[in-house]
Structure formats: structure tokens, C-alpha cells
């Protein structure tokens, strides 16, 4: 009887060991994800490739131009342009994290991405998105001080504070998304591997997990709310205060020009924050997947494209600096031509 009981225990232990090995094997079966993107079909892919290629080139060119102009012109070495330079640098990293991968998939037809590659893309996307939320709030506060508190502005917004606010925006963004990436990367993926999105995002990845995702979903919404809602409220209230001051300008022309600038800034900011809040914070289970893609395109593709135009290239000082640098390049080119003819 005792021998039978020992054999039974050994048999059960062997079966449990085999079952655990099979279960572990199934949970680690997914080695890559498939990003479904915006649609299927070679003709559509060619059109999307050309469109996103043009967007990427314009985005990179515009933001690099802003950085070079700010660095090359001493009269642009002010807090406002310091933050604009940071924003342009952030937008370059932001776009380069998503668009080149999309272009490669539309060009070659390979929509697969490794699990580690997907988590890496999500990590940098989340960090940069959170950093932009904080940086836009800092920029709006800088404009608020400049317009509503002009006498205190040089004292309050000094070089040291600018560096601290800029560094805090970047560091806070990278720290906040580290928690989410850790939680999501520790989920088990043992079933379908098709991500219904054009990049690796939190909720589409979590949806594929075969383990309990309640904590990951909750933490994602909470962290996204902390990173976007307070900065949005600060940004909105700052621009609202600026608009109130602008409406008191006696000159109708000056009032119209200032209001046009503030309203364009506010529209872009509202689109950016509202799309993030809609996707991550507000109840998302009833939202259509295609609609989520549209909202995601606002803060991943549209915002980096229009920010150089809205914040910088419409600015009189930036236009003058751009004309100055262009004339310098033309004069240098003429000088080279003269030297070549002289030889």
C-alpha cells in the first residue's frame, strides 16, 4: 500500500512538472507582434508611405531649423526660445521613434516587431509623451509670466530656473513611464500577437495578454492622468489669463494679432492634451479602435508637424533670424563662386 502511494505521488509530480513546462512554453510562445497599422493593400500602403514620408521630412526639417536658429542667433537666447528648442528636440525624438518603423513596414511589407523592440518603442514613446505634457505646461507658464507679470518676469524666469524646469520635464517624463513599461513587460503573452495600432501602445499591448491585466490597466490610466490632466489645467488657465490681458489691449490691430497667436497655441495644446486624455484616462472600452488611432495620430504625428509652425515660424523674431541666416548662406555661396572664378 505504501509503495502504491509513493508511485502515485511520483506519477502526479511528473504530470504536474510536464504541465507546468507546457504552460510556461505556451506563455512564452509569442516572440513578436504584428502592427496592423492603418489598412491593407499595396496601393494603400504606397499612398501611406508617401504621405508619412513627407510628414516625417517636414517635421524633422522644421524642428532642426528651429534648434539651429536658436543656437546661431544670440538675440534668441531667451527663456521662450530655450523651451522652444527643447520642444523641437523632443519632437524630433518623438517622430523618429514611430514614423521610421511605419515607413519601413509600408515599404517592405514586414509589419512584425520583436517583443523587446515593441516594449522599447513603447517606453520611449511614453517617456517623450509625458515629457511633452510637462514641457508644454512650462512653456505656457513662461508666457503667462511674460505677458501678465512683465515686471517680475526677468527675476522669476532666470537662467537657472529655465534649466531646472527643462530638466524636470525630461526627467519626470522618463521616470513616470518606467513603472508602466515594467508592469506591461512582465505580463504573459500566449495568444494572438496582432496589435490593432500603428505603433506599440499600452492598451493594445495589454489587450493581448493572457494574464490578469487589471492592475496594469488601472496604473496606466492613473499615470496618464497624472502626466496629462494637471499640465493641461495649468496650460489652459495660463492661456486663458493671457487672453484676458490681450483683450485689454487698446489697439485693435495689436489685440487681433496677439489673440490670433494665443488662440492658435491654445487650439494645438487642447488637441494634444484632449487626445491623450481620451485615449488613456477617459473610459475607453466603448471607444472604437479606428477612433483611437485617429486620436493617437493627433499627438504622435500632427503635433510634431505643426508645432514648429505654430510656436516659432510665425514669430517675427524667428522670421528675421531665418532671413538673416539665409542671406549669410547666400553671401557665403557668392563668395565661394568668386574665389573659384579667381582661381
Image (spheres, helix red, strand yellow):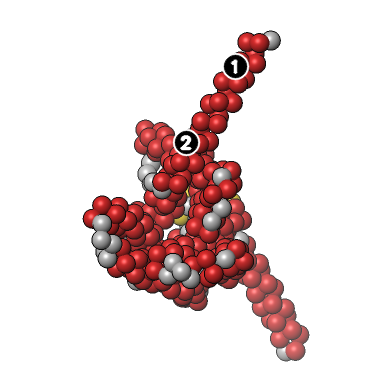
The residue depicted at 46 percent of the width and 45 percent of the height is 318
- Pick the residue in front: 179 or 338: 338
The residue depicted at 54 percent of the width and 49 percent of the height is 75
Q: Is residue 4 left or right of residue 260?
A: right
Task: Give the position of the C terminus as an image quadrant.
Answer: top right
111 in relation to 333, above or below: below
| Residue that protrudes farthest toward the right in the picture | 3
Q: Which residue is mark 2?
A: 323
- Pick the residue in front: 321 or 208: 321
30 in relation to 138, above or below: above
- Looking at the picture, how far across and down is residue 174, in whole percent? 59, 64
- Looking at the picture, how far across and down is residue 121, in whole percent? 56, 54
The residue depicted at 28 percent of the width and 62 percent of the height is 249
Looking at the image, is mark 2 or mark 1 earlier in the sequence?
A: 2
- Looking at the picture, how far across and down is residue 123, in whole percent? 57, 60
Question: Marks 2 and 1, how far apart in space?
Answer: 21 Å
- Pick the residue in front: 182 or 3: 182
109 in relation to 12, above or below: above
Q: Is residue 233 left or right of residue 14?
A: left
- Looking at the picture, how far across and down is residue 37, in whole percent? 42, 47
Q: Quick one: SS at disc 1?
A: helix
The mark found on residue 337 in the picture is 1
The residue depicted at 54 percent of the width and 56 percent of the height is 78
| Residue that protrudes farthest toward the bottom in the picture | 1
Task: Give the position of the N terminus as an image quadrant.
Answer: bottom right
Q: Quick one: SS at disc 2?
A: helix
Q: Residues within 10 Å of mark 1 (few under 14, many from 20)?
A: few
Answer yes or no: is residue 124 visible: yes
The mark found on residue 127 in the picture is none
Q: How many marks?
A: 2
- Pick the residue in front: 168 or 317: 317
Amino acid at each position: 500500500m505504501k509503495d502504491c502511494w509513493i508511485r502515485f505521488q511520483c506519477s502526479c509530480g511528473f504530470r504536474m512538472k510536464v504541465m507546468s513546462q507546457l504552460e510556461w512554453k505556451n506563455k512564452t510562445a509569442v516572440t513578436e507582434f504584428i502592427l496592423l497599422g492603418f489598412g491593407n493593400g499595396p496601393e494603400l500602403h504606397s499612398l501611406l508611405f508617401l504621405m508619412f514620408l513627407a510628414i516625417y521630412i517636414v517635421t524633422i526639417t522644421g524642428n532642426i531649423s528651429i534648434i539651429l536658429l536658436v543656437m546661431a542667433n544670440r538675440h534668441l537666447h531667451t527663456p521662450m526660445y530655450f523651451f522652444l528648442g527643447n520642444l523641437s528636440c523632443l519632437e524630433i525624438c518623438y517622430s523618429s521613434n514611430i514614423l521610421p518603423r511605419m515607413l519601413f513596414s509600408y515599404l517592405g511589407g514586414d509589419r512584425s516587431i520583436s517583443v523587446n523592440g515593441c516594449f522599447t518603442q513603447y517606453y520611449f514613446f511614453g517617456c517623450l509623451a509625458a515629457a511633452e505634457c510637462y514641457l508644454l505646461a512650462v512653456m505656457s507658464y513662461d508666457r503667462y509670466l511674460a505677458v501678465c507679470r512683465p515686471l517680475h518676469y526677468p527675476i522669476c524666469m532666470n537662467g537657472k530656473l529655465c534649466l531646472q524646469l527643462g530638466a524636470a520635464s525630461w526627467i519626470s517624463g522618463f521616470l513616470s513611464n518606467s513603472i508602466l513599461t515594467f508592469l506591461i513587460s512582465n505580463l504573459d503573452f500566449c495568444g494572438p500577437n496582432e496589435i490593432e495600432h500603428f505603433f506599440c501602445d499600452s492598451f493594445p499591448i495589454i489587450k493581448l495578454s493572457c494574464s490578469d491585466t487589471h492592475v496594469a490597466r488601472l496604473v496606466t490610466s492613473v499615470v496618464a492622468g497624472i502626466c496629462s490632466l494637471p499640465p493641461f489645467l495649468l496650460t489652459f488657465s495660463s492661456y486663458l489669463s493671457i487672453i484676458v490681458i490681450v483683450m485689454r489691449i487698446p489697439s485693435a490691430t495689436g489685440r487681433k494679432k496677439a489673440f490670433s497667436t494665443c488662440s492658435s497655441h491654445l487650439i494645438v495644446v487642447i488637441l494634444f492634451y484632449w487626445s491623450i486624455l481620451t485615449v488613456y484616462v477617459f473610459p475607453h472600452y466603448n471607444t472604437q479602435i479606428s477612433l483611437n488611432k485617429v486620436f493617437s495620430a493627433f499627438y504622435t504625428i500632427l503635433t510634431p508637424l505643426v508645432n514648429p509652425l505654430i510656436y516659432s515660424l510665425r514669430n517675427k523674431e524667428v522670421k528675421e533670424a531665418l532671413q538673416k541666416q539665409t542671406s549669410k548662406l547666400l553671401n557665403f555661396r557668392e563668395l565661394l563662386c568668386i574665389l573659384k572664378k579667381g582661381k
